[in-house]
Image: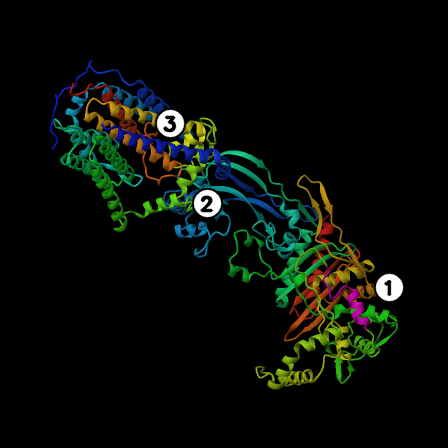
Amino acid sequence: MSRARLLVLRLVGVAMLVTLLGRLWFLQVVNGDAYVRAAADVRIRSVALPPTRGQILDVAGRPLVTNNTRPVVTVDAVALAHQPDGGRAVLTRLGEALGQPYRQIAEKVRLCGEGVPQPCWQGSPYEPIPVARDVSVPVALQISERQQDFPGVRTELRPVRVYPHGAQAAHTLGYVQGAQGRDGLEAAYDRELAGRPGRRDVAVDNTGRVTRTLRQDPPVPGNTLVTSIDSRVQSIAEQALGRALAASGGSSGAAVVLESGTGRVVALAGRPAYDPAVWTDGVTAREYEALPLLSQALQGEWAPGSTWKVASVAAAASAGYGLGATYDCPPGYTVGNRVFRNFASADLGLMTMHGALVQSCDTIFYRLADQLWQRGSDALQRTARGFGFGRATGVDLPGEAAGAVPDAASKKAYWRATRAESCDRARKGYPELADRARAAYLTTIARENCRGGGVWRGGDAANLSIGQGGVLVTPLQLARAYAAVANGGTLHSPRVGMKVVRPDGTTVRTITPPVTGRLPASDGTLAFIRQALAQVPRTGTAEGAFDGFPFGKIAVAGKTGTAESFGRRDTSWFASFAPDPAYTVVVVLSEGGMGAEGAAPAAREIWEGILGLRERR
Amino acid sequence: MIAVAGKRHLVWAPSLGPPDRLLTLLALGLSAVGLLLVWSATRMSGDHALLVRQAVAVGGGLVLMWLVSRVDLRVLRAYVPLAYALALVSLALVLSPLGVRVNGAHSWIVVAPGVQFQPSEFAKVALALAFAVPLGELRDGQRRPGFGGVLLALALAAVPIGLIALQPDLGTMLVFAAMVAGALLVSGAPKRWLLVLVAGAAAAGAAAWQLGLVRPYQLERLLVLVRPGADPGGIGYNAAQARIAIGSGGLSGKGLFNGEQTAGHFVPEQHTDFIFTVAGEELGFAGAALIVLAVFALLWRGLSIARQAGSPYGTVLAGGLVSWIGFQTFMNVGMAVGLMPIVGVPLPFVSYGGSATVAGLVAVGLLQAVHRSKPMQA
């Protein structure tokens, strides 16, 4: 054998040796540190440990929202990708175990990316992807015990919200999506309820199986929110509201119970409502559209009707009208060229302001408003705003409506905003209306509004004085105004939350409803109003509704309200309070008819319920 | 046809020279390291069956190595046609229903449940033996193989290579080709023949590419080699994980049995084709380089044996064996460190695998036999 040939082979061998050793040196010594870090990334997986969300309790510690755990099946996309077939076999088996078609599961675990059609997983590929919730325990056990058949698939217990009272106070409680409070108390107190997630770093093998726990920071459970809601009163209010809506044919409504002296919320009922359990398993877009998410108690706005008169009486007093003086209550009162009529055109004769409230005379207030307007006084609006109308109460719940107190400026602004439409209507009329007379009337108004307008007139003031003509209040606003009348004039920003408590029972903070103002009325005026309202259920407009009521046990005072609603049946109101228990109860039934017939009986039912609770105690 | 020569009985030849102790020592050492690494690679499964099987293979292989090293080459030569024929039959059998498909290639024959072997590994031995016949048995006065000899040698190589191409097993095909090239080189075949062969191989490769005979996954493997970051979850996963495991070993390694990547089984086939990643992670540069050096020391001895062989047959045989082990080692370590495309070839003496372990040790036994045989002309 030639030495040259051997040398060639030896050289080839040396070249290979040098190449391999050089490459090894480069990988292990030059770049070793980078690979050590890369190795840790591959090997260590951080798992977020969801904290237990805090409970929401009622005033007596009864749970309104609590937690339960349910098995959830998750899939690790990375572990699946390492399967020879990309995880197809595993997902097919999983589909059989869960009773879901392979396609459905495959879509859930498909990672979103360029060119990947929906649905797909938006989250991190290193995060376990839930593919089935509310799995039965036998199925969960089957999956967790057959890990060799289900590499990358895990079953874990995840907390879900439980609502022991179903649809009761659904809007107040709100809901949770993902780990975040989305509405109601869940949103308002999210920071306190949520707690802090923990973290577990685990060493995993290439199938994603945990081989060792390296580090664990336990989650910090959320704090408990104790509310001032009394679930028994809440239940009474819900039932009374439901029955009243059914009886009156109303479309929606609300019932509010406040502690008059503190501004704390005892009950907030709203209809239509829904069972918040729907959130537990996720809501589709279509289901979401159909959910009645609006809280009628603080987002519903209606004209207050005669319940507004407490503000008008206070305005009269502040404008110098004697409350004890006598006023005529004729069937009608002419403002400008228009006759404003009493309810049912009743001629009630001479009476004091006491009578005007008890009998709910309108014409006295028309005259009052007309005279104030002629004097250029804005006492009506000023007083109304002083009662907290026209702006949100600042309750500790999201999405509250502000209501509206119309005045010259707002009327002007509205006129400007709608002028183009008015002119359009002035030309075209209302051909779509079958009622020819009404169409003609509306066209006339449109013509006037097109030529000019937006001027605050005596008629506007007259409407305002009886809680009509663009006045809008929320049930919560009205309740807090009546609570202020009851408590001697202090306006609170209502609070549902009462205390935030740590899981160990110690108090984090106590929530006191802040005082936001005082009613623009003297103690004498307020006492006068209270006295008058005390008569309403006994001998006034609510006499029928409160026939046989045990006033000796609870001295309920109140005011009926019947508000016209354009194109719809009247809005039925009853606003009431009592000295002991010092509660304020407001009921509104949209399209519920007269206040004395719809809302007042519902309020009576609530009061009787409260009385029943007290007597049982 | 191959001419049958020599006597048909084994000669326990007291006339043989002393064995090469370094060669034996290196083969023993590498096998022992292999056992430790296989142990480490499989220990997390809690099942020692693989370790036991490998230990049995090493034991059997060492016995065969010892036996083969004691056989006179002239005696051995008599059995070459039989070995070659058996190799071809078994390679054909894997393509029959008796064959078992593992990782996409039909390369196994199941003898009994749990007992299977890989004919291509033994075919390496048979081919090395057979290939050396036309190249190494020269007529009187001839100093190097002629046209006919080279052609016959190539024909002898073509049949098993063709059968392996049908499995398909690209890695083994490349090892065979390297073995043919090495044996031809040391046989003294004329340079122009070698050049023609190299050109022919290049042309064949280009034609395969042009005709689309290169499979998509093979292209992907090449792509991964060029762009290591490509597709880390898919085809690039092996390569990326192997580099991470080896790279994280650093200079001195994490210690035997302390490899965390190894424990997590992040590198697929880490006890077989990727055993070197275990060495890289747990023994570090020091240990991994030592293993590579040990293999090359063994090859260096092998080349010396080729040079000092008593017969051209011994030279060509040793040249073929050295080329086989050398190229296979380079392929295996090269793919683990990201220098070579990923084709499944085991690391000689170290990887788990009975057939490969036994074949490798038998190859060392053959080198010893060449070393110990007296010159044929003497």
Q: How busy is the neighbourhood of tag 2: few (under 14 within 10 Å), some, or many (20 plus)?
A: many
Estimate the spatial distance between the alpha carbons at disc 2 and disc 1, rounded to whole Å: 68 Å
> Which residue sits at x=55%, y=53%?
A279
**The residue under label 3 is which amino acid type?**
Leu
According to the picture, the residue beneath numbered tag 3 turns out to be B293
Q: Position of residue B188 (x, y in %)?
A: 21, 31
The colour scheme used to paint the residues is rainbow
**The residue under label 2 is which amino acid type?**
Val
Q: Visible in this render: residue A561?
A: yes
Q: Is residue A152 magenta?
A: no
Image: magenta residue range: A378-393
**Discs 2 and 1 carry the same chain letter:** yes
**In the image, farthest residue toward the top:** B14
Tell which of B193 and B251 is nearer to you.
B193
Which of the image's four quarters has the N terminus of chain A? top left
According to the picture, the residue beneath numbered tag 2 turns out to be A75
Using the image, name the chain to which the residue with label 2 belongs: A
Tell which of A17 and B142 is nearer to you.
B142
> Which residue sits at x=67%, y=83%?
A450
Q: Tag 1 or tag 2, which sits nearer the N-term?
A: 2
- The answer to which quarter of the image holds residue A361 is bottom right
Mark in the foreground, 3 or 1: 3
Estimate the spatial distance between the alpha carbons at disc 3 and disc 2, rounded to whole Å: 45 Å
Q: Is residue A380 magenta?
A: yes
Q: How busy is the neighbourhood of tag 3: few (under 14 within 10 Å), some, or many (20 plus)?
A: some
> Mark 2 and 1 residues: CB-CB less than 8 Å, in contact?
no
According to the picture, the residue beneath numbered tag 1 turns out to be A522
> Mark 3 and 2 residues: CB-CB less than 8 Å, in contact?
no
- In the displayed structure, would residue B177 be above or below residue A423? above
Mark in the foreground, 2 or 1: 2
Q: Position of residue B258 (x, y in %)?
A: 47, 28
